[in-house]
Amino acid sequence: MQFDVVDTKGAVVGTTELDESVWGIEPHLSVVHQALLRQNANARLGTHKVKGRSEVSGGGRKPWRQKGTGRARQGSTRAAQWVGGGIIFGPTPRKYTQAMPRKMRRLAIRSVLSAKVQDERLTVIKGLEELDGRTKSMKSVLATLPESRSMLIVVPATDSTAARGAANLPNTKTVIAGMLNVRDVLKFDRLVVTEEAIAQIEELWALDEASRQPSQWKLAREAAAEEVA
């Protein structure tokens, strides 16, 4: 799949070949939804903690005798109905992590990348690494791109001058190609990828030749559908 490449002035200076298995598939929405839920769940710390009745201080004796006072019977001042008492069924430390098969995780990232292409929200740019790393320079470059609510810039290395230049810009985030994830791609309106980062993305998530071939089950299903038609 041929895709236009723009320079830091917003002008089209050439084209690049995008791998169809990464940028041209039909997005699998249910897998994307599951991957997003998993990523959000795995980001939770689970360090919440409250004290139960056995953990709060005080309440070592019965506050008054069982009968004859006219008041309700009480066994401890640390029961839940008392001020300073323990919490019933409160949150305790736990793990929220969810598992997801590797093939589904890879399908999810390919789906969101392909969705950006279909929605015309992908920009491939060259020359970002030649900037001086100043915020003013990066701001002027992003102003030449199609207007967007927010931008996710994908660069090939951590010590990128583009990352330094975009660090203080609002509604802009920079991520290296190896750390690209479903939540960031969905959160930001436009995906801006450097030409060097394209190769790294495809190296990580492109399908091999064996996986590109349709399975026997899929061929049989398509044949059955044609017979019914």
Image: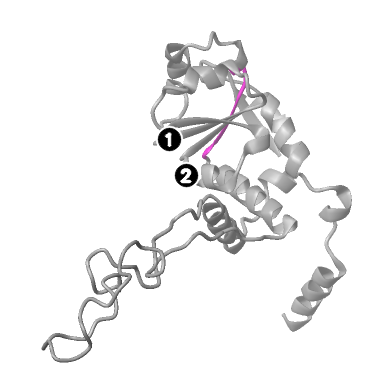
Q: Quadrant of the N terminus?
A: top right
In the displayed structure image, the side of residue 113 where residue 58 appears, left or right: left
User: Would you say residue 43 sits in the magenta stretch?
Assistant: no
Query: Residue at (67%, 47%) from the top-left corner?
Result: 24
Dot 2, crowdedness within 10 Å: few (<14), some or many (≥20)?
few
Of residue 120 and residue 183, the one placed in the foreground of this image is: 183
Query: Residue at (34%, 68%) from the top-left corner?
Result: 87
In the displayed structure image, the side of residue 116 where residue 24 appears, left or right: right
The tag on residue 159 is none
Q: Amino acid at mark 1?
A: Ser
Q: Quadrant of the C terminus?
A: bottom right
According to the picture, the residue beneath numbered tag 1 turns out to be 150
Q: Give percent across and percent down for residue 104.
A: 69, 58
Q: Amino acid at mark 2?
A: Lys
According to the picture, the residue beneath numbered tag 2 turns out to be 187
Q: CA distance from mark 1 to mark 2?
A: 8 Å
Q: Residue furthest top?
A: 132
Query: Residue at (83%, 69%) from the top-left corner?
Result: 219
- Considering the numbered disc 1 on the image, is that residue within a helix, a strand or a loop? loop
Chain part drawn in magenta: 121-128
Are the residues at dot 1 and dot 2 in contact (C-beta closer than 8 Å)? yes
Q: Give percent across and percent down for residue 136.
A: 42, 12
- Considering the numbered disc 2 on the image, is that residue within a helix, a strand or a loop? helix
Quarter location, residue 81: bottom left
The reply to whether residue 18 is in sight is no
Q: Residue furthest bottom?
A: 67
Which numbered disc flags the more N-terminal residue, 1 or 2? 1
Quarter location, residue 16: top right
Query: Residue at (46%, 40%) from the top-left corner?
Result: 189
